Image (cartoon, rainbow, N blue to C red):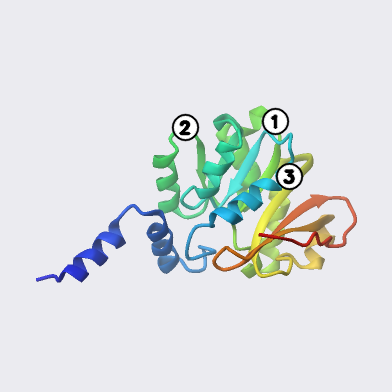
Amino acid sequence: MQSSVQRHLQRLWHGSDERWKFFRQWLRHPRATAAISPSGPHLVRSMIAEMPADARRVIELGPGTGVMTRAILARGVKPDDLLLVELNPEMCQYMHNAFPTLRVCCADARELVSKCLDSGFSDGGAADVVLSSLGLLSMPRDLQTGILKAAFDSLGPDGCFIQFTYGPACPVPREVLDELGLHATRGATVLRNVPPATVFVFRRNRSRAIVPRSTRC
């Protein structure tokens, strides 16, 4: 006979709470899931704050349980102008159910160009922003290169790639930035996130130095 504690743990494990859903996926797929819990509200706000004022078309990589997705929509991005790309099939199905009006692709981020075409997202033009919750820091360089190349192939000339990472250092090595002709700008350091995180913005063909802005939240 199960104890009340066992029943409670089972309800948590099989429940719909986003934090537990995220944690379960991390336990099942620790290498594919970048964090053990969704991004906190301070980090989400810092990511959204880096979006250019005139940004209209957005791609989100690794939406997880949709914490960032809700903030993107709340900022005024229309459902037709948003594409979600999630590698984890269970998370992808969750996002389909939670956001039935959005384009949700279950795919590797390196397939982004073809997914933009296949989903019809490209019909509206190139993206203005790619918002990424992927664990770039822990990826091998060839995987980082493939993801960033696909992202910038999907962005317009002035488009940017916004990424958070745990810790203060840029998650992409200088060699990868140089190979792709990119530069990184350091945004907010969010100490109130668990764990603390830093936002970086990547753009094409500018000074290749990482420019600190010393913003803390």
Looking at the image, is 123 positioned above or below residue 82?
A: above
Residue shown at 71%/50% (left/top)? 161
Measuring from the top left, give residue 40's x and y in whole percent. Answer: 53, 57
Which residue is depicted at the point 40% across and 53% down? 90
Q: Residue furthest right?
A: 207
**How far separated are the C-alphas under marks 2 and 3?**
25 Å
| Residues tagged 3 and 1 counted as in contact (Cβ below 8 A) | no
Structural distance between the alpha carbons of marks 3 and 1: 12 Å
Work out whether residue 214 or residue 56 is closer to the camera in this orientation and state it: 214
Q: How many marks?
A: 3
Mark 3 and mark 1 lie on one chain; the one further toward the N terminus is 1
Mark in the foreground, 2 or 1: 2
Indicate which disc, 2 or 1, sits on the residue closer to the N terminus. 2
Residue beneath label 3, please? 153
Q: Earlier in the sequence, mark 2 or mark 3?
A: 2
Q: Which mark is residue 98?
A: none
Identify the element where label 3 is drawn.
helix
Indicate the amino acid at tag 1: Gly
Question: Mark 3, residues whose alpha carbon is within 10 Å: few (<14), some, or many (≥20)?
Answer: some
Q: Nearer the viewer, mark 2 or mark 3?
A: 2
Find residue 101 and name its label: 2
